Amino acid sequence: MAAIDAPATALLSVSNIEVAYGRSAPALRGVSLRLREGEVVSLLGANGAGKTTLIRSISGLLKLHSAKVLSGQVNLDGARIDGVAAHHIARKGLSQVPEGRMIFANLTVAEHLQIGALSAPVEKHEMSRRLVLDLFPALRPRIDDQAGWLSGGEQQMVAIGRALMASPRLMLLDEVSLGLAPIITRSIFEQLDRYRRETGCAMLVVEQNAKLALDFCDRAYVLDRGRILLEGSAADLKADPRVQDLYLGEAPGEGSAYTFRDAKRYRRRTRWLK
Amino acid sequence: MIFFLQLLVSGLAVGSVYGLVALGFVLIFKATDVFNFAQGDLLAVGAYLMFVALAVFNLPVALAIIATVVAAGILGAMLQRVVFKPLQGQPLLTVVMATIALSLIIQGALVIIFGSQDLSFPRTLPSSIVAIGALRLSMLDLIIMGCSVVCVSAFALFFRYTSLGLQMRATAEHPEAAALSGINSDRVFTVAFSIGTVTAALGGIFLGSLQVVSPTLSQIGLLAFPAVVVGGLTSIPGSVIGGLLIGVLQQLSAGYFDGAVASVVVYSGLLLVLLLRPQGLLGRPSVQRH
Ligand SMILES: Nc1ncnc2c1ncn2[C@@H]1O[C@H](COP(=O)(O)OP(=O)(O)OP(=O)(O)O)[C@@H](O)[C@H]1O
Ligand SMILES: [Mg+2]
């Protein structure tokens, strides 16, 4: 275990963590994950597999949900961050596009960008702002509008823009495509790809649309009921019969979202696999 | 007509104080989800702090106000750290019970320390009479109105234009997202309690100057509640307008009838607003798509 997870060589390393909400059974059991500087890794898995829980364990949000890391550790840049408050972690260069967007409905788009910039040095603000409006030109005319009145896709752009304003070294993206039209999802991922090439920002991407995620990332992990089921390069996983069967084989086509029925089928199949 | 105008001005003066106190209340509620029933008692504490600064330390009025404001700010921060931080995440009702306990503790402590008799400030803000034609206005009313307007505007500018103000609005709306952006919610909560206590203390200074300093100020401070509810629990401009309405209603009915009628009128008005517009006059259901 120690050899794989040697914290010093990784930007982010999650080592064998067990996480539980309150007194309920652990949502993560012995999960390990590693991410190098500039690397894009995706995290796949059915509903309830523990993807969001893993993201929360990294960004310091467990406490807000009365959960905690029972054993194992999380390191960012070699320093332990499990148990550290979310706002401290944010200031270490980690930012997040959370599940459900979590925009501030009554704040304007401009104010979201200002808030995102809080954890970046002042001299970077103007450049990041230009970059964000460049990536998402649709936000320009809405800049002084309250975010609560924007469309779902525009709100997602605001959430991503807010995260980018921090000039992060590592970005966590939790189901960016949720509820968006395939064409918007694709354009958002194109912009993320462009951002990543321009800045070398590392990304950990949770995504239900496996094809989209595997096309976008370098490596991927498949999480199943709190454990890592598979792990490998994007190309290997795309070729892996189990992934093909579970995620890609019957996928109704490019850009389609993973549906509830897919999830149920997935659960049946993984059980059958074991 | 003259009588009406005079009542109107004194109503606006008292009302602006209610508005100021209500603003502090709304701020605490919005930022920290604490529905603070001790706000009226913090107002009384402000009046007594001012009394101590004037009568015990012999400070000039301006310095006494500054000292009171500073002390109130520190007291607010301490309350957050000692009482409300440990209660974070508890159900609303538990926290409300805690604020009621706090309210009773403060009332008792004030009586123990200062007795229950009426005190008055040995020196106070100028209180001459200004005559405009036949209209005779109290200088004190005008000063208090002016100060309240300045304070409310200052707080409004603070929320709108400063980084800390923005952080407070963000935390009030979505604490989780605020934390993810590097905002320290503890710091924001502490500032909210400080400012909320300072507005209450300023209210205490003003009401103590208009009337007397006594433990009953706690109850008068409760008039900030109708102001809050009338204005909508989360609207800062609403709470100020609510305060002005309550003040004017109270002074008019007390002037034409008497004090008892005034409370019947004020609270009937409150009930009426609640029945017709449960979200308050300016309160609105928050815009949020999911
Ligand atoms: N706030 C919470 N309190 C208690 N239990 C929770 C909480 N959030 C998640 N869980 C539990 O933890 C497990 C993993 O949930 P998690 O949200 O991490 O799954 P997920 O992989 O993100 O699913 P989805 O694809 O539906 O978003 C689930 O069994 C869920 O019931
Ligand atoms: Mg999730």
Image: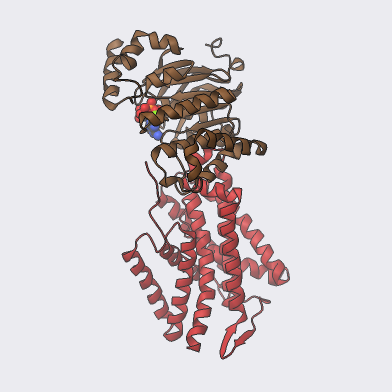
Chain colours: A brown, B red
Q: Is residue B275 left or right of residue B49?
A: left
Q: If the image is split into quadrants, where does the C terminus of chain A sit?
A: top left
| Total labels drawn | 0
Taking depth in this image into account, of B121 and B102 the one nearest to the observer is B121
Quadrant assignment, res A78: top right
From this view, report whether residue B270 is shown above or below residue A193.
Answer: below
Taking depth in this image into account, of A12 and A14 the one nearest to the observer is A12
Q: Residue B88, how many percent across, how many down?
A: 48, 45
Q: Residue A234, how many percent across, how many down?
A: 44, 13
From this view, report whether residue B141 is shown above or below residue B45.
Answer: below
What residue is rendered at 42% in x and 17% in y?
A: A214
The quarter of the rendering in which ligand 2 is drawn is: top left
Q: Residue B64, how many percent across, how many down?
A: 69, 67
Residue farthest along the bottom direction in this orientation? B134
Residue B172 in view here? yes
Q: Residue B8, how many percent across, how many down?
A: 49, 80
Taking depth in this image into account, of B4 and A167 the one nearest to the observer is A167
Residue B107 in view here? no
Taking depth in this image into account, of A250 and B131 the one nearest to the observer is A250
